């Protein structure tokens, strides 16, 4: 999308928010997958490696969450604010023309 159009329509912030949200969801999924993998392995060496990756994924999740809170993309402690933000995001997404 043209940069000027993105700024005029507010889509530049939407893109940043969408990328951050996708990254957060991916981090959450990785945490879940590492936790399952840890419970499924019998090898202490593999378990140690997976635990290290799990800890790193949790740290990454925390960093993404903090970034999103600072930018106003995520309101984990104010549910009504989060619902309002989600509704605005959905409305914006509905206005995107399909190609």
Image: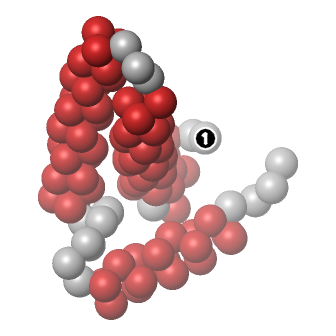
Q: Nearer the viewer, residue 3 or 70?
A: 70
Q: Is residue 18 above or below residue 36?
A: below
Residue, x 41% and y 83% (percent of image)? Answer: 83
Q: Nearer the viewer, residue 28 or 13?
A: 28
Q: Which residue is mark 1?
A: 1
Report the residue that reaches farthest toward the top: 45
Residue, x 62% and y 65% (percent of image)? Answer: 93
Q: Is residue 61 above or below residue 56?
A: below
Count how many numbered circles sit on residues in the image: 1
Residue 19 in view: no
Report the residue that reaches farthest toward the bottom: 80
Q: Position of residue 74 (x, y in %)?
A: 30, 66
Q: Position of residue 71 (x, y in %)?
A: 22, 58
Identify the secondary structure beneath mark 1: loop
User: Residue 61 vs residue 83: left or right?
Assistant: left
Residue, x 51% and y 70% (percent of image)? Answer: 89
User: Residue 25 vs residue 91: left or right?
Assistant: left
Q: Quadrant of residue 27?
A: top left
Residue, x 25% and y 65% (percent of image)? Answer: 72
């Amino acid at each position: 999308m043209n940069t000027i159009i993105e700024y005029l329509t507010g889509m530049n912030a939407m893109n940043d928010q969408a990328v951050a949200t996708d990254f957060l969801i991916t981090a959450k999924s990785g945490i879940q997958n590492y936790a399952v993998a840890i419970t499924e392995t019998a090898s202490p060496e593999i378990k140690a490696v997976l635990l290290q990756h799990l800890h790193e994924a949790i740290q990454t999740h925390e960093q993404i969450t903090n970034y999103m809170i600072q930018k106003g993309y995520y309101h984990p402690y104010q549910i009504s604010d989060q619902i309002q933000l989600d509704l605005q995001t959905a409305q914006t997404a509905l206005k995107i023309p399909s190609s």
